[in-house]
Image (cartoon, rainbow, N blue to C red):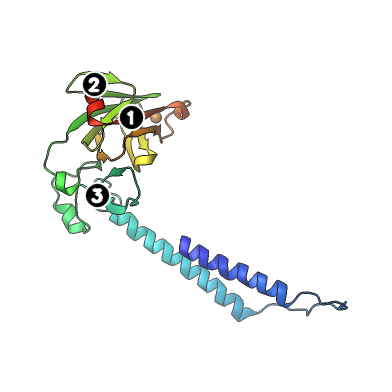
Amino acid sequence: MLTIGTALFLVVQGAILFFVIRYRRRPGDEGDGLPVEENLPLEVFWTAILALIVIFLGIYSVDIFQRMGGLNPGDHTMHTMHPPEQAVAVVAKASSKTTSDATAAPTPEIGIGASPDAQGKAPDLVVEVAGMQYAWIFTYPDSGIVSGELHIPVGKDVQLNLSARDVIHSFWVPQFRLKQDAIPGVPTKLRFKATKVGTYPVVCAELCGGHQGAMRTQVIVHTPEDFEV
Ligand SMILES: [Cu+2]
């Protein structure tokens, strides 16, 4: 869409600039312009072009939607669509790009799973994440620690098990390019590896009530030594 939009912009703005300069009023010219009226073939031509572009985008979008799981969002085949520049390494659990592989995957989970090389291996750290109006609660089953912030070690394979206690929330870490709904009664998960030490905001991206805007916290990515302390 950006490519098409840029091309159209250049054509339209280019034509405007050209006409402004080429047909500017010359000194001493006091006459009227030519009375140009409709040009049917031209109008049919550009209407057809726009119709074709819109139809193409529509069909293309349906194709993308199907490959993302369509009406079966548990089937993941396109999680490799993440932008290359990001703070975490995420690859689809179903490491496949074809639909046949995805249907062969045992139980499709809702959420982003382990990368192909970590598949079948237990994650380094599991954190239970509960969303509620209007806070995120992080529980570390191994140590029993409960926190309002997510602390994780850098470079470790982390799995978040998401749940919701009241309504649907959405766990979003913009800098990680990670977002996953927390749904009452439907466990979801995220598995990722943070690649940069730092503090990143966590936002609830689902309209979950009047104070949704305040449902924020942060992920703190520590060095392994720091994390142990
Ligand atoms: Cu929320």
Q: Is the Cβ of the residue at disc 1 closer than 8 Å to that at disc 3?
A: no
Q: Amino acid at mark 1?
A: Ile
Please name the residue that numbered disc 1 is placed on.
220
Disc on the earlier residue, 2 or 3? 3
Please name the residue that numbered disc 3 is placed on.
76
Disc on the earlier residue, 1 or 3? 3
Q: Amino acid at mark 2?
A: Val
Q: Is the Cβ of the residue at disc 2 closer than 8 Å to that at disc 3?
A: no
Circle nearer the viewer, 2 or 3: 2
* Viewer-closest of 166 and 14: 14
Q: Residue at x 36, y 36 (%)?
A: 172
Please name the residue that numbered disc 2 is placed on.
229
Q: Residue at x 47, y 67 (%)?
A: 53
Q: Position of residue 106 (x, y in %)?
A: 13, 46
Q: Is the Cβ of the residue at disc 1 closer than 8 Å to that at disc 2?
A: no
Q: Is mark 3 within 8 Å of ligand 1?
A: no
Position of the C terminus by quadrant: top left
